[in-house]
Amino acid sequence: QVQVVESGGGLVQAGGSLRLSCAASGSIFKINAMGWYRQGLGKQRELVASITNSGSPNYADSVKGRFTISRDIAENTVYLQMNNVKPEDTAVYYCYADPAYSRRSWGQGTQVTVSS
């Protein structure tokens, strides 16, 4: 079983920056993709960014040019650098990991609040 734990959320002013971290641990043979979803109040969960184990990133249009996803393969850790944040980025951010030969594992979520 794989456990996923996020950290780094908090309150930030619009235009500021925040860095989220996510670590996967447990019975891991190999992790394929990792990434981040978010869910704002009253909204559906949406993909923010993902990254393959070869380092290829994918971003939602709403965050392109502002957010950067990166990954430490050896540490099974993924990061989300959030720059020039906007009030509409306010949401609970959920990290996921796709272990080989196992189902997707999710973190508990970390709150990001952007004040205007």
Image (cartoon, grey):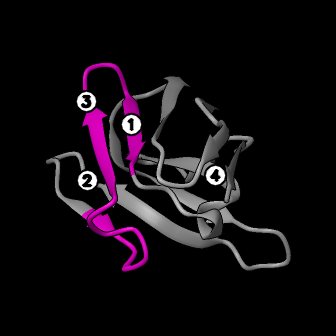
SS at mark 3 in the image: loop
Measure the alpha-carbon separation of dots 3 and 1: 8 Å
Residue 62 colored in magenta in the image? yes
Disc 3 marks a residue whose amino acid type is Ile
Q: Is residue 45 left or right of residue 51?
A: right
Q: Looking at numbered disc 2 in the image, what kind of residue is underneath it?
A: Thr
Q: Nearer the viewer, mark 3 or mark 1?
A: 1
Mark 4 crowd level (few <14, some 14–19, many ≥20, 10 Å Cα): many
Q: Residue 93 bears which disc, if any?
A: 4
Between the C-alphas of marks 1 and 2, the distance is 10 Å
- The numbered mark at residue 78 is 1
Circle 1: residue type: Val
Q: For the residue carrying disc 3, how many other residues have a C-alpha within 10 Å: few (<14), some (14-19), or many (20+)?
A: some
Disc 2 versus disc 3: distance between alpha carbons?
10 Å
Residues 78 and 27: in front is 78
Q: Label 2: which residue? A: 52
> Residue drawn at (39%, 37%), measured in percent from left and top?
79
Read off the residue under disc 3. Answer: 73
Element type where label 1 sits in the image: strand
Up the image or down, 1 lies above or below 97; here it is: above
Q: Seen in the image, is 6 located left or right of residue 22?
A: right
Residue 48 screen position, x and y as percent:
47, 65
**Residue 54 placed where, x, y %?**
14, 48
Quarter holding residue 61: bottom left
Lower position in the chain sequence, tag 2 or tag 3: 2
Instruction: Answer few, some or many: residues within 10 Å of disc 1's Cα (few below 14, many 20 plus, some between 14 and 19).
Output: many
Q: Which residues are magenta?
A: 58-83
Residue under the point 74% across and 68% down: 40
Q: Residue at x 32, y 48 (%)?
A: 69
User: Nearer the observer, disc 4 or disc 2?
Assistant: 4
Q: Is residue 73 visible?
A: yes
